[in-house]
Image (cartoon, helix red, strand yellow):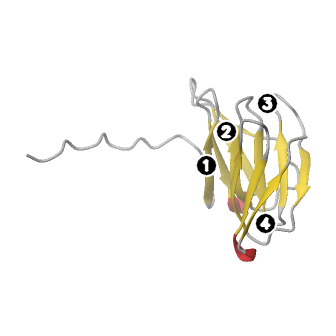
């Protein structure tokens, strides 16, 4: 007996993406995508499918994304910077300039510590919670 087929994938209504790379889901179900070549992060609200560009100024090719339990968005970019944007904020903060050459992964634990995978240097960095 064969296994039942999985449901067909649903294409989310993001517009104008150019090289979408990282993706994360927030605590309320919103979906966040790093738009690599457009140097931006966009959010798709879970209930309305309304797309919003997050106010990350000077973002340089988002490499990885994470969203914590409070809705704060963390993004690393090609410069090795880690930027944060608390839910509802209108400007970002620079969490750290990690020196990472290829920040390929980002995660936040329940204590607020941020972990960055630095692929080119074969290491994982831990940025202690503030």
The crowding category of the residue bearing disc 4, from other C-alpha atoms within 10 Å (few below 14, some 14 to 19, many at least 20), is some
Secondary structure under the numbered disc 4 in the rendered image: loop
Question: Label 1: which residue?
Answer: 23
Circles 1 and 4 in contact, beta carbons < 8 Å: no
Give residue 10's position: percent from left, percent from top. 41, 41
Circles 1 and 3 in contact, beta carbons < 8 Å: no
Q: Is residue 89 left or right of residue 71?
A: right
52 and 108: which is toward the camera: 108
Q: Earlier in the sequence, mark 2 or mark 3?
A: 2
Q: Earlier in the sequence, mark 3 or mark 4?
A: 4
Residue 53 visible to the viewer: yes
Question: Label 4: which residue?
Answer: 78
Q: Earlier in the sequence, mark 2 or mark 1?
A: 1
Q: Is residue 102 above or below residue 12?
A: below
Question: Label 2: which residue?
Answer: 43
85 and 130: which is toward the camera: 130
Question: Which circle marks residue 87 in the picture?
Answer: 3
Distance from Cα at disc 1 to Cα at disc 3: 17 Å
Q: Earlier in the sequence, mark 2 or mark 4?
A: 2
Secondary structure under the numbered disc 3 in the rendered image: loop
Quarter the C terminus occupies:
top right
Q: Is residue 67 left or right of residue 86?
A: left
């Amino acid at each position: 007996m064969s296994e039942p087929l999985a449901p067909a994938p649903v294409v989310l209504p993001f517009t104008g993406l150019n090289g979408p790379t990282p993706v994360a889901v927030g605590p309320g179900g919103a979906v966040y995508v790093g738009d690599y070549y457009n140097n931006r992060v966009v959010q798709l609200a879970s209930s309305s499918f309304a797309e919003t560009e997050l106010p990350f100024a000077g973002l340089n090719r988002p490499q990885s994304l994470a969203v914590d339990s409070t809705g704060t968005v963390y993004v690393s970019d090609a410069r090795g910077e880690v930027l944060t944007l608390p839910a509802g904020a209108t400007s970002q903060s620079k969490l750290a300039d990690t020196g990472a050459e290829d920040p390929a992964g980002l995660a936040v634990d329940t204590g607020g510590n941020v972990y960055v995978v630095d692929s080119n240097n074969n290491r994982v960095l831990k940025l202690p919670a503030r």
